[in-house]
Amino acid sequence: MDEERDVSGYKGKQDQIPELEIKPEIETVRYVYSGSDEIVKYYTDELTALCPKTGLPDFYHLEIEYIPDKLLMELKSLKLYLTAYRNIGIFYEHLAMKIFEDIRDKISPKWLKIDLRAAKRGGIGAEIVVDSNKL
């Protein structure tokens, strides 16, 4: 198969995602119970991003679970960070991995799991799970 042939129109549209700096960044607070293994879970239905081909909005349910080590995410900054995606054209799978990597790099949790569920489009649903235990 010829990898240079692009009938979808997506070629090159996602190449910058791994290096993309989302602003504002997630802020952190010190976790004063370091050494325990509690699971912290955040979830929202307010995450949106754009289809990289059509520019139409995609709507998501996002769940973030982690076992903190020394840092926690500050929730207001997390909301502002997630809101920044509303103007970014990004595939579901790339969105899940980008959020995972940004959180991992920011707080270095003992364990992290991202579960991203896209609202159905054309009758097809999508769920992307990124789990640090499976990478």
Image (cartoon, helix red, strand yellow):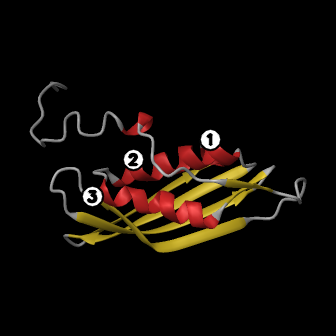
Q: Which mark is first along the chain, 2 or 3?
A: 3
Residue furthest out toward the left: 7
Residue furthest out toward the front: 24
**Residue located beneath label 2 in the image:** 94
Q: Horizontal placement of 38 versus 87: left or right?
A: right
**Residue located beneath label 1 in the image:** 105
**Residue located beneath label 3 in the image:** 50
Determine crowd level at label 3: few under 14, some 14-19, many 20+ residues with C-alpha closer than 10 A: some
Determine crowd level at label 1: few under 14, some 14-19, many 20+ residues with C-alpha closer than 10 A: few
Question: Quick one: quadrant of the N terminus?
Answer: top left
Is there a contact, CB below 8 Å, between mark 1 and mark 3? no
Residue 70 picture location, percent across and down: 81, 49
Determine crowd level at label 2: few under 14, some 14-19, many 20+ residues with C-alpha closer than 10 A: some
**In which quadrant of the rendered view does residue 13 lie?**
top left
What is the CA distance from the residue labelled 3 to the residue labelled 2? 12 Å
What is the CA distance from the residue labelled 2 to the residue labelled 1? 16 Å
Q: Residue at x 27, y 58 (%)?
A: 50
**In which quadrant of the rendered view does residue 126 lie?**
bottom left
Q: Residue at x 88, y 54 (%)?
A: 34
Judged by depth in the image, the label closer to the viewer, 2 or 1, is: 1
Q: Residue at x 47, y 46 (%)?
A: 98
Residue 30 picture location, percent across and down: 80, 54
Q: Amino acid at mark 2?
A: His
**In which quadrant of the rendered view does residue 77 lie?**
bottom right
What is the CA distance from the residue labelled 1 to the residue labelled 3? 24 Å
Is there a contact, CB below 8 Å, between mark 3 and mark 2? no
| Residue 57 vertical placement versus 8 (above, below) | below
Q: Secondary structure at mark 2?
A: helix
Q: Amino acid at mark 1?
A: Asp
Q: Amino acid at mark 3?
A: Leu
Q: Which mark is first along the chain, 3 or 1?
A: 3
Q: Secondary structure at mark 3?
A: strand
